[in-house]
Structure formats: structure tokens, C-alpha cells
Amino acid sequence: MKTIYIFLIPVFFVLNGFGQTPPSVTPTSAFINYGSNVTLTATGCAGTVNWSTGQTGASISVSPKQSARFTATCTSGMQTSGASNSVLVQVGLTTSPCNSNVTVSSNLSNIGYRYESSNYISGTGDIEANASVQFKAQNYVQLNPGFETKSGSVFKAFTGKCTELQTREVLTGRQIPWEILWGPDDFIWMTERDGKISRVNPQTSAVQTLITISDVFSNGEGGLLGMVLHPDFANNPYVYVSYNYSIDNTVSGMRVKVVRFTYNSGIATLGSPLILVQNILGNSTHDGSRLVITPELKLFVTTGDAQDLSAPQNDTNLNGKILRMNLDGSVPADNPIAGSLVWSKGHRNPQGLVYANGKLYCSSHGAGIEDEINLIQQSGNYGWPNVEGFCNTPSEITFCNANSVIEPIFSSGTGGTWAFCGLDYYNNDAYPRWKGHLLLVSLKNQTLYSLKVSADGNTVEGPANLYLVNQFGRLRDIAIAPNGKVYLCTSNGGNADKIIEITPIVE
């Protein structure tokens, strides 16, 4: 008889991915300038949230030196979920002007920077632990004895054609130009907050004032603001503007109206004002007032909340909205609310608006975080004042779910605001790097940004590119000429504001 011995070996295991739902992480993507941070929040976990960074907790703050992806898992008892959605945090670097030969001899610390050269870059200094640096040269990059990348730094070197933005002052000595646009006469049309509308010859810098609107009430950030020309200007020489006036000559009496003027080219004046809409609550801040006319000949107008937080979610109030009207001011029959100009709601202070590829994009100022770029949809609710940026706090998530809030396609993140302002779309072969990009200017960060739009137009892809950082001060608006040149206007005050011409040069 054989004796059979049976050994029982205890097996211990942790369930992974069974019975435990992965958490949901917001924001789904973010862009930060180098050195800034963004808060990531995981919801739907009843246990411990474990992040790919090694951190734990429902919310963490991250400040990567280069673009990176982050995920989270949820552990409850002996069960650990699979990974959450992957969040891409993109990090923007400041790009240098393009010079023939670049020598980087000093140590680089606390910086996010990309050096570009049309010939070569020679490096002899150190890249310190808190720096993220790139060398891009058309011919070669040479790292000499003494060059060292310290532990914790990020360094990349590669070859490629360099691009340069050549700038020229077209005009100076102006006082807060608010809107600039390229006219069918090949002049720049410009509003100034004190009430003037002018034509600017971009070649000679000559300024021709067409009108100073007498009832403009200029106070704080209010005054004459947005403008758009009729698309068929030769046959319909109409100029549409949005501006502040006051019913009693006080700040508390400030209102906003949209008015159509008629251009008389024979005597170079604007006249025959026709009020399309008026008595929208105004303020010395938060008046919106960007205008766009779409190919279907509908006029879109942004309005701010005028510091009234009850207005943006109130369908009967025109503040904190994007309005849609016929070119005579009447309500289109296919607007979402019968008899109402309201197209979308939940906006704080939208000051950029552009129609491109059949879609309407809007840039808006955040309160202390989360400046936004939104893709505007009929009947869309964009959350303000209950939501700032993405739906990533418990109260925001509750409100978003209950009200079908549409999240932005791009945000400045939770590290602060950049003061998003003028917005345009570049669709020109003159500068291939920008083709298919939104171009955005900022007041607070004093920067021009380019943001690549996806092929379907629904998202922003890749990191934002930064240009002209702190070179001209606060940047208010942007216009694009048919030849691919780009024009910016500053908003520094002191009768010293400028229009800057940018000529992209591809080496």
C-alpha cells in the first residue's frame, strides 16, 4: 500500500481589477507654463487613491518639468482597481528668437526654455536640476567639455529648421485699442476704448478716425469694445460694435448695447446708427463684447456677467451669455429659446470669439484659476459661476451632472489665470507651423500662444507654444491678414499702446 501525502499550501493574493472600479480623474488634460502646477482630483474611490507619482489622496498637485501623463488606482481592502483615465499635463517652454549661431555658456536654472538657431548651438554650461531646456539647431548641436545635465534636469537636443517671428511697430501712441480686424480694403480697422473707430494703413501707419461715438461711457475696463464688419462689405457697408453707455452717467448706470453703423467711403465716416439690442447690464469690468458674423449671416455677441453672479445661469437674463441674432437685431426662428437671443449660457467674461471650420470657439477669463477656451454649442451650459474650468470638485461634479455642463477644450489650469483675450484661427500656408492652430493673446501673461486644433475641430492637441513672452506688455487682440501676417494690439495704457506686425519667416 502506498501512502499519499497531500500538502496544503496557503495562497494569498490581492484581487487586481476585479470588483473595484477605477477612479475618474479630472481635469482630463491641462496645460501649464513651466514652473506652474495643476491640481488633479480623483473621484469614485471609497478607499485609498494611489497615483502614478507615488502620492496618495483624492487630490494632488503636480508640477512636471516636461509634458507627462498621470493615472490613479483605487485600493479598498485587498482589492486594487485598474488604472484610471490617463491625464496629459502639457508643459509650455518659452522659445528664443532664431539667431544664426547660439552659444549657451552660463548655467541654466529655474527655467523652461527652448533655444533655436538657423545654424548651430554650442553648449558649455550646466543644466541645473530645476531646469527644462531644449536645443534646436538647423545644422548641428555641439556639447562642449564642461557641459553637464544635473540629476533632476530635463534636456533635449535635436536638429530641425528654425522659425522666426519678425516684428515691426505699425502704430504707437494709442490709448487701449480693444478690437483690431483686417478689413476688405486691406486696412486695419480698430476700436479704442474711449469711443474712436479708425482705419489704420498698415504700410504708412496713417490713421483715419471715422467716428468718436458720443455716448460711449468709458470707465475701468468698459467703453467701446468689440467690432465686426459685414462679410459682404462692398454691398452692405455695415460696422457692428458693442459698447458701454450709462443711463445716468454713473458706473452703477452702465449698460451695454450693440449698434450697427453705416460706412460712407466717400467722406470716410460712420453714421446712421441702428440699435440692435440695448439695456444689457454693464459694469466697469466683465462686459464681454466680442462679435462674430458667421457664413449663415448670424451675429454672435459675447456678454459678461457684469459682476452679477445670478445672471449667467438665468435664461431670462442676457448677461453671462453668448447671444445669436439676425443682422437687424431680430431673434432667429431657430434659436434654442423662442423669442430669446440666448444661444449659450454660464459664461463669466468671454473676450475672444472666432468662427472656423464650421465651429465657434470662445476664450474667457477665469476668476482666479481656469481661463478657458470653449467650443460653443447651441443651448450649451458652460458652468459659471458654479463651475470653474473642468468639473473636478464634488460640488462642481454634482452641478455638471445635473446641468449637462460642457467642459472647456483648453484651460490655464488651477495654478492661476493668464487673462485670455483675443482669439483667431490661422489657416495660411505662410507659416506652416501655425496652420490649423488657434492663436490666442493674454493680458496678464503678456504672451502669444498657438494651440493646435484636432482634425475634427473638437479638441486642442499637444502643448501650447509660447511667443513674444513679455516683449510688448499686455496683449489685447489679434488680427490675421490674407498674406499670413499677424497683427497684435497692446493694452498697456498711458497713450503708449501699439499695433505690432508679425511676419513669420521660415528658415
Image (cartoon, helix red, strand yellow):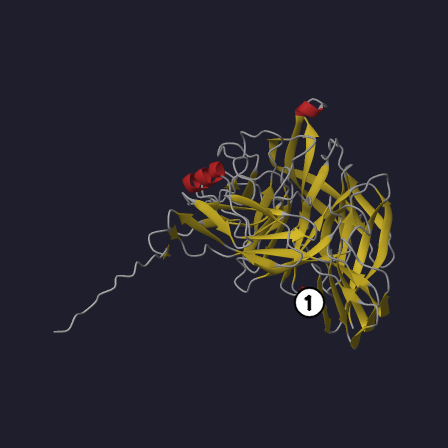
Can residue 20 be seen here? The reply is: yes
| Closest to the observer, 458 or 278 | 458
Can residue 265 be seen here? The reply is: no
| Closest to the observer, 358 or 405 | 405
Residue 479 vs 178, above or below: the answer is below
Count numbered badges in the picture.
Answer: 1
Q: Quadrant of the C terminus?
A: bottom right
Residue 8 image point, x, y percent = 26, 61
Q: Check disc 1 and report the residue beneath it.
A: 433
| Residue at 76 percent of width and 58 percent of height | 128
| Closest to the observer, 308 or 160 | 160
Residue 474 image point, x, y percent = 77, 45
Give the secondary structure at mark 1.
helix
Check disc 1 and give the amino acid type. Arg
Residue 307 image point, x, y percent = 62, 30
Residue density around tag 1, few if under 14, some if 14–19, many if 20 or more, within 10 Å: some
Task: Give the residue furthest to the bottom.
Answer: 139
Which image quadrant is residue 191 in? top right
Q: Quadrant of the N terminus?
A: bottom left
| Residue at 53 percent of width and 55 percent of height | 52
Which image quadrant is residue 385 in? top right
Which image quadrant is residue 452 in? bottom right
| Residue at 46 percent of width and 54 percent of height | 84
Task: Give the residue furthest to the left.
Answer: 1
Residue 173 image point, x, y percent = 87, 45
